[in-house]
Amino acid sequence: MSDHPEAPITPVAAYEPPYYVAVFTAVRTQEQSGYSETSARMEGLVRAVPGFLGMDHAETPGGLGITVGYFRDADALTEWRINAEHGAAQKRGRSEWYQSYTLHVAKVERSHGFSRG
Amino acid sequence: MSDHPEAPITPVAAYEPPYYVAVFTAVRTQEQSGYSETSARMEGLVRAVPGFLGMDHAETPGGLGITVGYFRDADALTEWRINAEHGAAQKRGRSEWYQSYTLHVAKVERSHGFSRG
């Protein structure tokens, strides 16, 4: 989920609250045809949304995947939510790629970070 | 992160808002002595906190780990935050186990889920 795979992996840093998180937790099916291409396309689209701050992704092999998107405000999230191409991808996700998922949209009240250097 | 590893993996379901999420994103160091034991102990402790609703965890091998804890209200989160044994584990995490991490605490405004059945 980085444009620079050679760079060290780091979690997205804490922003000054308030900001929004969209927490997407999912288990995928065996049917993953077209998933990677669509996922890369969605990442490109969301990065172009004004107020998009960044995203984190982790996936346990054969298990749960979690994607967290960070947005400056509710308007930025709304723009992403109503994007037509995003809507089409979600529909295909439900019919093919996802066994189950949950989305939690939340307003960040506090945050902090730590880095060894 | 389940008491029943033989059960199918499923993301924690959507609760009725408002509720809280604590999103912990981390990259670990090479020094992981004692990490598994402490992690299991912390999971036991947090599950005993009144108002704790559940947790999701995903970790990309050699990459980012994301843990999301769900809590009924701010009081439940506070109880977990001030737990002394949790505080000691956090301190050890900064000195040994984590290269970097970020914590985002947020109030959920909307949520929904999907399951294939």
Image (cartoon, coloured by chain):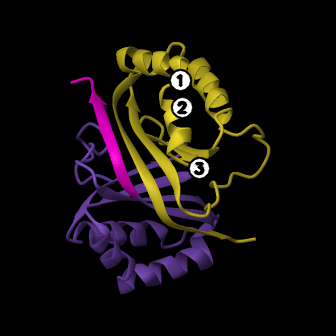
Chain colours: A yellow, B purple
Label 3 marks a residue whose chain is: A
* Secondary structure type for disc 1: loop
Q: Residue at x 69, y 51 (%)?
A: A9
Q: Is residue B113 shown in magenta?
A: yes
Q: Chain of mark 2?
A: A
Asked if residue A117 shows in the view, the reply is yes
- Magenta region: which residues? B107-117
Residue position for label 1: A83
Q: Position of residue A56 (x, y in %)?
A: 58, 46
Q: Residues within 10 Å of mark 1 (few under 14, many from 20)?
A: few
Residue B12 in which image quadrant: top left
Question: Residue at position x 20%, y 70% from top?
Answer: B50
Q: Are marks 1 and 2 in contact (CB under 8 Å)?
A: yes
Alpha carbon of mark 1 to alpha carbon of mark 2: how far? 5 Å
> As shown in the figure, which amino acid type bears the numbered disc 2?
Trp
Residue at numbered disc 3: A72
Disc 1: which chain? A
Q: Secondary structure at mark 2?
A: helix
Magenta-span inclusion, residue B41:
no
Q: Main secondary structure of the magenta part?
A: strand
Identify the image quadrant of the C terminus of chain A. Answer: bottom right
Point out the image quarter for the N terminus of chain A. Answer: top right
Task: Report the residue at 44% width, 65% height from top.
Answer: B36
- Please name the amino acid that badge 1 sits on: Asn
In the depicted structure, whether residue B110 falls above or below residue B55: above
Q: Position of residue B105 (x, y in %)?
A: 45, 63
Q: How many marks?
A: 3
- Residue beneath label 2, please? A80
Q: Earlier in the sequence, mark 1 or mark 3?
A: 3
Residue B87 shown left or right of residue A14 in the figure: left
Q: Earlier in the sequence, mark 2 or mark 3?
A: 3
